[in-house]
Amino acid sequence: MIFTKLTYFLEIANRFDTLIWFLFRPKYWEHTFYKIIRKFLLNHDSPKDKIKATKWASLNSVSSRKALLNLGFKGSYKNLNGNYLKHAKVRASKSPIKMGGPADLNLLYNSVKLLKASRVIETGVAYGWSSLSILKAFSERKKKGVLYSVDMPYPKKKNEDYVGIVVPKNLRKYWYILRKPDRPGIIDAIKLAKHQVDLCHYDSDKNWWGRSYAFPLLWNALRPGGLFISDDIQDNLYFYYFVKSNSLNFAITKHKGKFIGLIRK
Ligand SMILES: C[S@@+](CC[C@H](N)C(=O)[O-])C[C@H]1O[C@@H](n2cnc3c(N)ncnc32)[C@H](O)[C@@H]1O
């Protein structure tokens, strides 16, 4: 009984502490406001929805090479340089703070190459694996490019200094990080990219309501022929809803037990 009461008290104290953390940071206010609103909206992230989304994604999943091919990308598919990754792993091991896992690096690397993408927006950086693969692809050609990354560091974790740690110095000249939440970071990134984006990689707020805010904004900023990639589409049915209700040309691939959705504009 005493133990239950103590756990309850600690949980309340932790929530209060988090609220104070957000209150002292104006750039998080819009994000916090919508996080609170979300609590009163329909929950589309139930285990039932997740099972349905996983089943659908699994039925439609193909290899990443085939996914790109199905969306009209012809050309050779190469793997990221192993040595580069080895050095990046060493840099990651220096971070005392654990952050979100990497996306499908070869998929992103090849997407930039095959699309000849030069304006890219990504949401969710953490260690920066996805950023590394996009920037590496830029660096290997004459006409480079700019990557606009939106990332909100984990609240209270003090991980700011370690965000993007795997990206080497020589690649950072093509990189612009907006250290803010998706709200308002995505709109700022779209403005910086002058509303003409070749490739979007979405790997931040995976909640239905988070996606329902971000997907239409990013989709509208994509140029015709551009590519939209979202990680973890098995979390809820938003990707399914988005492609079906807009009759979009999509493909799905699996990476480390999770599903990635691709849409060609
Ligand atoms: C899965 S990790 C990203 C991994 C990264 N793409 C990679 O391949 O290494 C998710 C990141 O998104 C950030 N994030 C979560 N919710 C966010 C939000 N609402 N706005 C901006 N960033 C957010 C987290 O802090 C974390 O850094």
Image (tube, grey):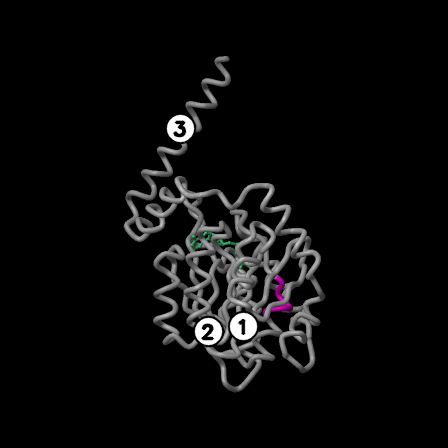
Residue 218 quadrant? bottom left
| Location of residue 84 in the rendering, given as x and y in whole percent from the top left corner | 62, 68
Q: Earlier in the sequence, mark 3 or mark 2?
A: 3
Q: Name the residue under label 3.
A: 12
Give the answer, above or below, for where 125 lies relative to 82: above
Q: Are marks 3 and 2 in contact (CB under 8 Å)?
A: no
Mark toward the viewer: 1 or 3: 1
The amino acid type, in three-letter code, at marker 1 is: Leu
Q: Are marks 2 and 1 in contact (CB under 8 Å)?
A: yes
Q: Residue furthest top?
A: 1
| Location of residue 144 in the rendering, given as x and y in whole percent from the top left corner | 49, 81
Helix, strand or loop for disc 3: helix
Q: Earlier in the sequence, mark 1 or mark 3?
A: 3
Q: Mark 2 points at which residue?
A: 222
Helix, strand or loop for disc 1: strand
What is the distance, in whole Å, between disc 1 and disc 3 at their CAs? Answer: 43 Å
Mark 1 CB near ligand 1 (8 Å cut): no
Residue at 42% over, 46% down: 158
Residue at 41% over, 68% down: 176
What is the distance, in whole Å, between disc 3 and disc 2 at their CAs? Answer: 42 Å
Segment colored magenta: 104-108
- Dominant secondary structure of the residues highlighted in magenta in the image: helix
Say whether residue 260 is magenta: no
- 236 or 64, nearer to the observer: 236
The amino acid type, in three-letter code, at marker 2 is: Leu
Q: Mark 1 points at which residue?
A: 227
| Location of residue 259 in the rendering, given as x and y in whole percent from the top left corner | 63, 57
For residue 102, side relative to residue 34 (left or right): right
For residue 83, side relative to residue 11 (left or right): right
What is the distance, in whole Å, between disc 2 and disc 1 at their CAs? Answer: 7 Å
Helix, strand or loop for disc 2: strand
